[in-house]
Image (tube, rainbow, N blue to C red):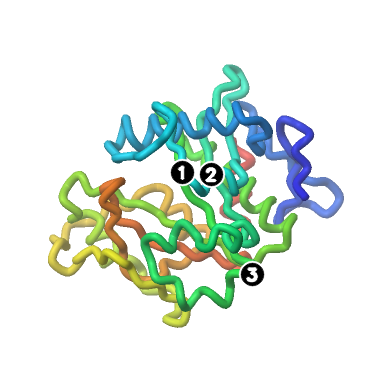
Amino acid sequence: MLDKSSSSFTATLPFANAKADTSITGSRYRVSYARTPSDVLAAQRLRYKVFAEELGAHLDTRVAEHDIDHYDASCEHLIVREICSDKVIGTYRILPPAAAKRIGNYYSDNEFFLNRLHHLSPRMVEVGRSCIHQDHRNGAVIALLWAGLAEYMTRNNYDNLIGCASIGMADGGHNAANVFQQLDPAAIAPIEYHAFPQHRLPHEALSNDQPALVPPLIKGYLRLGAWVCGEPAWDPDFNTADLLILLPMARMNTRYLRHFVKNA
């Protein structure tokens, strides 16, 4: 079980010194698990602000100005607060394998056929709904969220992390196509870990050979050691092209993560 008794937690991270754990609290921010309904609502309000108000996603939600779906009740919610204001300015949700089994699927199953990953599911965690308030996209907040994820994975002895990483399609999808087509071949998962989009983005037709503008989240995943599990899917509700990301914990680049956490 997770210890949620404090407002922040001390991480037993893969890169932590054996004699002293590494605190996931920086000079400006702290990361914690949502412990109360109001914590979760704050995360859902931030998600709505970013996805709907800023990016124009069409969200079907039962609470006005909050992004809520049926996965939320089964997830852990990782939140980053600005210390001086105590406002939630970053969030990630975490769906553990036992909860995914109870629900009957992962969120990613709505976009991809995950048949080749099913054998990983007993120890595979899904993350999603990652977002950061536009005034705090400085690298420090996402680093703290990743540190929290690393703590969660190592504490629970999970092996693999999956999630959908999105690329906006305000330009009609040209940049999304360029991002996929210009990926380093080493970033593509071995074929036995490929997932197949239910609504495939026609990247061959959309690519215009312009230099790809890779979203910071995807850059970060790749620097952490994640793979892209094949072609992008089109998500019409969010108007994004989504790449399925797979990060085996054995591949995590802990030096990259440590560099950003210490500057948070």
Q: Residue 120 vs residue 188: left or right? A: right
Tell me which numbered mark, 3 or 2, is placed earlier along the sequence.
2
Residue 239 lies, in percent from the top left, at 26, 48
Mark pair 1, 3: CA separation: 23 Å
Q: Residue at x 46, y 29 (%)?
A: 45
Q: How many marks?
A: 3
Mark 3 secondary-structure assignment: helix
Asked whether 264 or 150 is in front, the reply is 150
In this picture, is 211 found above or below 239?
below
**Is label 1 in contact with label 3 (beta carbons under 8 Å)?**
no
Q: Quadrant of residue 6?
A: top right
Residue 137 visible somewhere in the drawing: no
Q: Is residue 192 visible?
A: yes
Name the residue tied to disc 3.
122
Contact (CB < 8 A) between labels 3 and 2?
no
Q: CA distance from mark 3 to mark 2?
A: 20 Å
Residue 230 sits in which quadrant? bottom left
Q: Residues within 10 Å of mark 1 (few under 14, many from 20)?
A: few
- Residue drawn at (50%, 65%), measured in percent from left and top? 246
Q: Is residue 113 above or below residue 213?
A: below
Q: Secondary structure at mark 1?
A: loop
**Which circle's residue, 1 or 3, is located before the other in the chain?**
1
Q: Which residue is mark 2?
A: 72
Tell which of 140 and 73 is nearer to you. 73
Which residue is tagged 1? 69
Which numbered disc, 3 or 2, marks the residue closer to the eye? 2
Residue that appears at 20% across and 65% down:
203
Q: Amino acid at mark 3?
A: Pro
Q: Amino acid at mark 1?
A: Asp
